[in-house]
Amino acid sequence: MNESGTPVRPHAPGTLPAGLVDVVVIGYDDAAHIADAVRSALAQGPAVARVVAVDDASTDGTGAVLDRLAARHPRLRVIHRRVNSGGCGTPRNEGLRAAGSPYVMFLDSDDVLPPGAVDALLGAALRHGVPVAAGLCVRRELPGRVDTHWQPGLYRTAALHPSPEHHPALLHDTLCVNKLYARSFLTEHAVHFPEGPYPYEDFVFSARLLAAGPAVATVPDTVYVWHVRRRAARPSISLDRDRIANWHARVRAHRRGVEIYRAAGRERLALAARVKFLDHDLRIYVRELPRRDARYREAWWRAARTCLAGYGEAELAAARAPARWIARVVLAAPAPRDLDRLAQLAARPARLLPPYAVASGRPVWADDLPAAVLDGLTTAPARHLPVTVDATLRLRRRADLALRVHDLYGRLAAARPHTVSLELRPRDGSPALFLHSPLTPDGTGWTARIRFALGPLARRGTHSWDVRVGLHDAQGDVLRTAVRAVGPSRRPCALLPNARHVLLIVRPRTTAAGTLSLRTLTGPQALWTTLTTRLHRSG
């Protein structure tokens, strides 16, 4: 072992020792998916000594699926729990106790490990002699297979972090499943999951892990595919946010994590965790408040005010501007208000909608909330301003996109924007399409109109496209942001014949935060969608 407590075995360059990793798979009533999860772990190759599958007292045949797999795969060990734990922590802890290899990973029954995931993480752990290696997680929306990267900034390049204090941004990745751990390190520092029905158990596990001060190696490889099934009969904890109990559980897990950091003397990590709660967790729930009923909103507002009352000004100031502005509004207002406007500010990128009030010469949220100061707004670089760009899209054979840019306390006018560039960015990371148009002043902002043919979208096939704009100013700077979908659309989608794909469908979409995006369907998928839609209407 090295000084960090990590088992290290010599190995020849370009090869990895066999049998160093156990993968713990947990499942409850997931007979439809757990076989795929287990197979993805077994397919990782000789580095995986054993897959430990824990059936948490399923009632749907999940246990039988695992037993049949175990009969064909000697590396699979199945543990059947007799009583359901009500959460993910207990079965993970049981699988961890049953593991016998130097390293361990965790996998949920409805997700998969992509090829090469274990080798990428194990190689980094052995190369650097560290007890933790982490890689990129992809959130895959099903059935549409729309991928987004989870905390991509942490995994752009390979890196070695001597301790979490050297890189507190590690706290933003609270997932336990996209990492490989030295089992001896977890045992020595009593790193485990909370038992029983404890939502957001990852938060507590991650806090216990990072409070122990491990060196962490990160890799740019995709090491985990997190399947997001929004239509599932039993949504995952992270998607089951329509109940106020979910918010209470998240706040409890957050507070427990802060307590763990402070008990370990990691004040810098405790501060980072509290700032992360503002920048990430708070904004998630605020974006969704307009969709909630009055009873939920009032309960959420009371709980949020209680939580935020414990924040000092230095902690608020350490958060990004949109998050600390939102926190100040919640603290200043005794009851829910301005929810649509707050949701736009909580979007990514943030949008600050009018009115633009001023009190004592400072920008504030509203005339009657002078305590909710929008600090930093008058000094931030123009390219970082939370500017709002409204978009009205009409689809025929061509797209007709009308844009309206709102000024922001005169800051944008001072930068003298003159051109807008439209960027259609495929979510698979392939090159974007760009168009440009001049901006026309209209007294309180600027307008622009961009028309473009839909045919070029078909060349990329079926895709989801993010719609972004860049505002080019006289200093040569560019402010990039997303656009807010407003106004009626004359047609909900465009159906066009296409020489290459037979048919092209272009559908505008609006996210929960009001951001405009596009979805293109081509070939057989477009034909099938058209047929099923017409059959549904005729029925």
Image (spheres, rainbow, N blue to C red):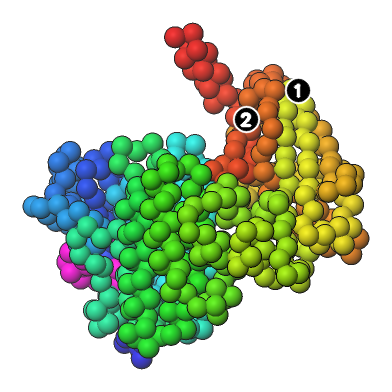
Q: Which residue is drawn at 29% across and 49% down?
A: 109
The N terminus, quarter of image: bottom left
Residue lying farthest to the left in this orientation: 82
Instruction: Indicate the position of residue 271 as horizontal and vertical percent values.
Output: 47, 79
Instruction: Indicate the position of residue 342 as horizontal and vertical percent values.
Output: 58, 53
Q: Nearer the viewer, residue 426 or 307?
A: 307
Quadrant placement of the C terminus: top left
Residue 379 shown in magenta: no
Q: Examine the rendered structure and indicate whether residue 221 appears above or below residue 402.
A: below
Q: Which badge, 1 or 2, is on the more N-terminal residue?
A: 1
- Badge 2 amino acid: Arg
Q: What range is drawn magenta here?
A: 92-106
Residue at left 32%, top 72%? 256
Q: Is residue 19 left or right of residue 332?
A: left
Label 2: which secondary element = strand
Foreground pick, 352 / 463 = 352
Nearer to the camera, 289 or 471: 289
Q: Residue 397 carries which label?
A: 1
Question: Tag 1, which secondary structure?
Answer: loop
Residue drawn at the location 78% of the way across and 36% of the way down: 402
Residue placed under numbered mark 2 in the picture: 507
Kind of residue at disc 1: Arg
Is 101 contained in the magenta span? yes
The crowding category of the residue bearing disc 1, from other C-alpha atoms within 10 Å (few below 14, some 14 to 19, many at least 20), is: some
